[in-house]
Amino acid sequence: FRMAVELDAKLFWTRLQRVVGLWREQPALFGDASTLCMAVGKDSDDRPDNLRITAVQLYLLGYEFPETVLLFRQDRLQVWTSQKRCSILAPLIEKRPSDCNYQLEVEPCVYKEEESNAANFKALLADCSSSGPFGVLLKETKWQEGMFSKKLLEMAMGAKEEGQLNVVDCASGWGEVFSVKDEVEINCIRRSATFTSSVYKKYTVAEVEKVIDENKQISMGKLSKDTEGVITEPKKKFQSVTQDFADSVDTCYAPVVQSGGSYDLPALYSCRAETNEADLKFDTIVLSMGSKYKSYCSNIARTLMVDTPPDQESCYDILHRTHQHILNTLQPGRTFAEVHAAATQFIEKEAVSGVQKQLLGKLMPRLGYGIGLGVRDLHCEISDKNTRQVKANMALVVMTGFKDVEVASEDASRKTVSMVVADTVLVVATKREDEPHYAEVLTKASPAFGNVSYKVEDDSGAEDDASSEGEDKAEKWKASLRHNKGQVQSNAETRERQQRKILEMKRNASGGRSRTKTDEKKDFTTAGKLGREQLSSYSTEKEMPEKTGLFLDKPRDTLLIPLWGTQVPFHVSTLKNVTKSEEGDSIFLRFNFLIPSGGANAYTPGTLFPQCTFVKELTYRVHTRHASKADIILADVGNAIKQVKQYDSQQKEKEGLVKQGKLAIDRTSVVPKLREVNMRPFKGRKVPGTLEGHKDGVRFVAAGESTDILFDNVKHGIVHPANNDPICLVHFHLKNHIMIGNRKTLDVQFYTDVMDDEKLQGSNMRRFSEDQEIEEERRTKNLIGRLNSEFVTWGQRMQEIAKFRFETPFYKSEFTGTVNRNTQVVRKTNNCLISLVEGPPFFCLTLEDVEICVLERVILGHKNFDVVFVNKDYKLGVTRIDTVEMQKLDEMKDWLTSVNIVYFEVPQPLAWGPIMKEVISSDSKEEWDPWSEEDGWSSFLDINQADSDDSETDEDDSAFDENDAPESSDSYSEDEEDSEDSSGDEEEEDEEEESGTDWDEMEERLTKEDRQNSSGSSDSDSDEPAPKKGPQPGFKSSKPKPKPSQVRPPPPRPGGPRPGAPPARVPLKQ
């Protein structure tokens, strides 16, 4: 025990008042005891680690005090301990809050004077007997050793037997205290769970895969001990952890490794399972481990499966889905018995075929328990008999398992298997948008079948030689193992196969439709209100002014024009402009009205009333003697039109804005702050300020003005440390626009400069000597490190306070491309694609909003290609990243596959304007299915032949020579576009002549020409001249282009072209 311990007085008094408050409000939980005695004896090897009586001390004091008695009375807490420990506890008395009516008394005791202690204990028990029941933890009294605490408990139990003292069990009350966690506890459990899952993924699973990869043997006992060593000494594996963290972390129990048909799920559930020294078998492997950070525990269990039999895969699917169902059922207000019943009902409903019918009887009887200061708290056990309610901020271990499931397998040891999945979760009051369940999973390691299964097919033709079989098996493992992160291998065949699965999955989901339809945008302009009858000049004729002749009613923005003896009102919003002309003694005022038109800025009344006739223009004649009046009307009407347009412009600027709630400011605690940061876009001028983090959002204060951003309106929050960048930043990509100054924005950024551009490029270094350069580099590196640390720490504290998850870019997979007409570095995060260093405008693409990706200009020999993302909301058009280095092509394909985005490859840029217009038109008529083979994206973006092509076509494709590929530059030049435009009329005539040509005939003709191009030049015996390879860029082609509507491409092949396939003829960008 280290005497340099400092206790957290504020936390102590907060938790003490919570305990006393619960005791007073619900005394029945504590057995209606008037006194609670928590007596901890001396350290002993035989005493279990996870006793609740020890947890009481850790909960209140943060440390364990052996040979100490905590005596909770109705008005005070009495502490009896050694003289040295009294000096540690004494400062708590001085720091008691003024509003606290509960006292703390600390009294030293002498352990060796048994007679004196016995007399004190006898008087104490007599006093407690007169006041009411005496509460203890009955099940834990037997574990107390020593002359002090043990003596007190023995005398209390003796007085109970003699009928002099009513001793009751208060375990339920303390279980209720520990069940709901505060922010400090949640943070500790969260860090513990993160560490546990990291050990599982980055060490234990990696070791298992390494053993399988190298076809070696390792004992399960050694794997368990090595895993325990990583938990107890994390710096050996994780160099980035701090020494403070390493000193605060420990193991909850010995990690469990089971395989080879021998599984003990009941012992695993009770955290008492043992690992034997047998070799690890490559069949069904059960892994379980847990760690504790500052005494707060976490737990994880997974089942790895190698060469999984179909029956076992079917049963694991039910197990995984049941586990997810439990997580979604853990909602505040339900009882644990209801959660258990929901799981059994789900299995009864879903497991109805074949081998699955047995699963209900194989389900573990209890499906989880509470976790915190103890690794297993049965107060929150998920069982059919626990009628306690689930509450927000409860930390639980959800453990779903099937024991001794019988499956069909040729291997006798695999005919009976057990499978289990366990996660540490946190029950939340309201489900977050980024979480699929009410229970937030803290152990981040996906239990999906694809992430825990491995498959190696046996080679029937393998040699009998044992060494050859071993080498062959090892090579197969290397080709089939998946990394624990689930990344797709950089293998063209594997990638294409996965792309087919993704396409099939999207095709089967929701009837083949995956995009999110958006509501029609409302028009808030004056013309829009007028067309929807939300605005009128006059409701009745009586409201019209009694004026004759031409008159402008300014208050109502209405122009009165006399027609056939009647004043006819025209609202100013219907006017386009007014002009004046003179002829002889007459002045003509020509009023031009708005009329229906197409395009994005369509006239709303024309859209709402397409059957009506609209006045285009109206001319009013005035005699020259009334010239002054005409001039006044001309000026007033012009000003009125200008004001209406200005108002409409402001309304359009505010369109899509959603009123934010009020940010709750916590003045009682210290909030995380970033000082001397700038905001983009800025209000007026660039002024540094302070970014404050609160539970509901952030507030930026600069020059006396504040800007609030609520987390409810944040789609992505990104902490972006500087990595060869001039700034480090925090970026918020919003769901709805907010106003910054006089303009609305979806992106708000807070940043600080780490160096100017010249220093970043190293141009200033030439002025210094070598020593000065080294010193300057050192100072710059330290500055960048300090600022990055401040931003990262701020993000971590915000995650603890607000439970808002910030994302961080992956710097290793960054690439350079043209975004917003500027060359920028594009980086990936878990949920989006970003380029935030330059701007505004900023580039932040949400992956969930992407329907497909098209890779353009993918031609052998090109240095660059373009990436086009098609949004699910077609009205948003497409998002482009141009001129990406060709070396990044395979990496881009792997990444798109890993995030389940279907991609296509085309050799030339496409005309996306007409394409999207046609898609929107078809979609509005319910004639568009994005994943259909005939009418979807594959119908014109897939440029390959189907797998079922005949052998002749395959031979032709395989004979394709890269030298026959058309030569073209990396991008179209203006001369090319001009050349194509100049020949547009002639091509149109050619197209009309070819309009009757069938696509199959055209494809056959073009395929024949390609075949001649690939072989004709090498045929020296032929008398005919070799045909030309095709039109060169910039020259008119003699071959007519088919219209996009005529094109009927072959069946789909997602994932890009087959190696060696010739470029297809698709609609090009005109």
Image: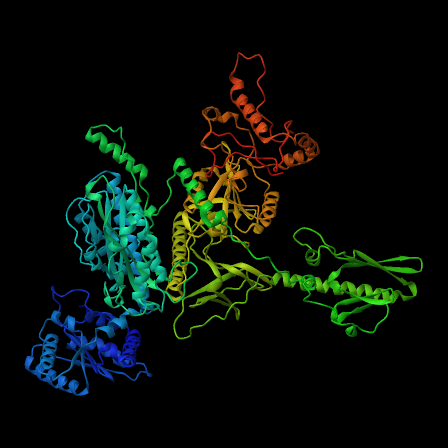
In the image shown, does 110 or 204 lie closer to the viewer?
204
Between 19 and 386, the residue placed more toward the observer is 386
Q: Is residue 1069 left or right of residue 266?
A: right
- Camera sees residue 473: yes
From this view, report whether residue 497 is shown above or below residue 571.
Answer: above
Q: Is 527 on the left-hand or right-hand side of 45?
A: right
**Number of numbered discs on residues:** 0
The colour scheme of the drawn protein is rainbow
| Left or right position of 756 against 39 | right
| Residue sitting at the far left | 115
In the current view of this chain or complex, which residue is farthest to the right? 585
312 or 559: nearer the eye?
Answer: 312
Q: Give x and y (percent) for residue 801.
A: 38, 66
Figure quadrant of the C terminus: top right
Q: Is residue 95 visible?
A: no
Q: State left or right for residue 737 relative to residue 5.
A: right
In the image, residue 1043 sits, relative to residue 850, either above or below, namely above
The image position of residue 724, as x and y in percent, is 44, 49
Q: Residue at x 71, y 34 (%)?
A: 985
- Residue 64's x, y, as percent? 20, 70
Which corner quadrant holds the N terminus? bottom left
Rendered image quadrant of residue 86: bottom left
Q: In which image quadrant can residue 997 be found? A: top right
